[in-house]
Amino acid sequence: MRTAEVKRRFLAHFEANGHTVVPSAPLPAIDDPNLLFVNAGMVQFVPYFLGQQTPPFRRAVSVQKCIRTPDIDEVGKTSRHGTFFQMNGNFSFGDYFKEEAIRLSWDLMTKPLEAGGFGIDQSKIWATVYLDDDESIGYWRAVGLPAERIVRRGKADNFWSMGIPGPCGPCSEIYIDRGPAYGREGGPEVDEDRYMEVWNNVFMQYERGPGTDKENYPILGDLPAQNIDTGMGLERMASIMQGVDNLYEIDEVRPLIDKACELTGKRYNVSHTTTAAESHPDDVRLRVIADHVRTSLMLIGDGVTPSNEGRGYVLRRIMRRAIRAMRLLGYEDPALPELLPVARDSMSPSYPEIATDFGRISQYAYAEEEAFRSTLRAGTTILDVAVADTKKAGGKTLAGDKAFQLHDTYGFPIDLTLEIAAEQGLSVDTDGFKRLMTEQRKRAKADAQARKTGHADLSAYRGALDAGGAVEFTGYAEVSRESK
Ligand code: ATP
Ligand code: MG
Ligand code: MG
Ligand code: MG
């Protein structure tokens, strides 16, 4: 079953149950200064949950484009994490609650294929509930799930929030047992690779306060109504329906792996393992390439452009990781002109605007790769020498001033230095690097301040001072006198 069909069935099931189909919001989260990218289907509905706006419907269904940058290090190493993914979701705004949400999700999962469902064998389904949520256990039992496949879990897994202030609540997740080929028996507590989390039903009833700790943050109180917010990973469900080992091998992503293999001459799945965790580094790289190229396409498609801060920096980092992974597989030519059109062809059936806007998208992407190639040309030798010197001296840590020099003079982002150093078995003195960055920022601020107060631009002197410190400079006294 193609990914597009998984999506269609999800929408159809909930539309038939009184839900209004709402299009995906764009990836950049524009209304929330705390959030760079939309990371769940509920984001566009937050004002409804908080009672700040009245929704034009009581029930909605969507397939939301999502970005989760915190998952970047998992990509390729687990079977289930993409930086970009699509979240199928059904929502109730003060309408139905736990009982109907559980029943609706069970029905879609277990309804036979020929009746428009996913036809999942009931004996493969597990559910988790929040610690004391006996009510949900009762509803799961009522639809036919036996007690031994219902697991209570704590806050880290079964109490959902966006990670920032906003609506939150206990949740109940649905897992599919992929069988012994994928890991150990015993349920999601034992093996999250074998038992793949596909769907989360959130019982949205509280408002969360600030705090970064995943488990300890204040609850400000009840929301005006009890709501339902669910998220089913489209790619994860597609991987189940297609019987492939991980979400990088579904129809929307796999062509990128194949193209990368063709370009690099590598073979995919050299490790012949069903569990991503044991994969050969080349297999991980091929998945990273596929994931990151697709993510870049979708981000530029939604108006993000590479830059040195905020959203643009996330995009830049993702693009550069993909390009570097291609180089590590031995491909030194510009890679995006080969790969991006493959991503376009996979994604444009669901997102036709990707095809019509491809001229603009590819221009940004190819220019970024060119810029990165010249950065690499300039900095790689310096870094290689520094790495070799450090190793020769028996050191394990690359000096902070080297990392700073690479950043300052050659435009090497610190992540890149960290990554290359790690590949060589070295760490980086990031404290030293940060100290130099702070000093530089202070200098820049002082210069800006001096300019603002209408005095001489000191940056030229500063530059000279920084370069050698051998400039006689007596200007401060003048400046401070004048500014009185
Ligand atoms: P996991 O524990 O596997 O990291 P999660 O609990 O963080 O997933 P939720 O926040 O509950 O995920 O999101 C709802 C659903 O979205 C998940 O059940 C999953 O199907 C899907 N999903 C979450 N993160 C990703 C991702 N990085 N890539 C693909 N699908 C994802
Ligand atoms: Mg997660
Ligand atoms: Mg989870
Ligand atoms: Mg979850």
Image: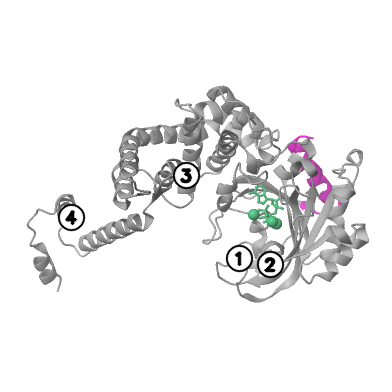
Which label is found at residue 214? 1
Closest to the observer, 59 or 124:
124
Which label is found at residue 421? none
Closest to the observer, 361 or 440:
440
Q: Is residue 445 above or below residue 83?
A: below
Counting the numbered discs, the total is 4
Marks 2/1: CA–CA distance: 8 Å
Check disc 3 and report the residue beneath it. Answer: 317
Secondary structure mostly seen in magenta is: helix
In the rendered structure, are the residues bearing label 2 and label 1 in contact, judged by CB atoms less than 8 Å apart?
yes
Task: Name the N-terminal-most of marks 3 and 4.
Answer: 3
Which label is found at residue 462? 4
Check disc 2 and report the residue beneath it. Answer: 155
Closest to the observer, 193 or 46:
193
* Amino acid carrying mark 4 in the image: Arg
Q: Is residue 214 above or below residue 270?
A: below
Residue 345 in the image, given as x and y percentages of width and height? 63, 29
**Image point (47%, 44%), residue name:** 317
Q: Is residue 73 above or below residue 216?
A: above
Q: What segment carries the magenta color?
A: 1-20
Marks 3/2: CA–CA distance: 31 Å
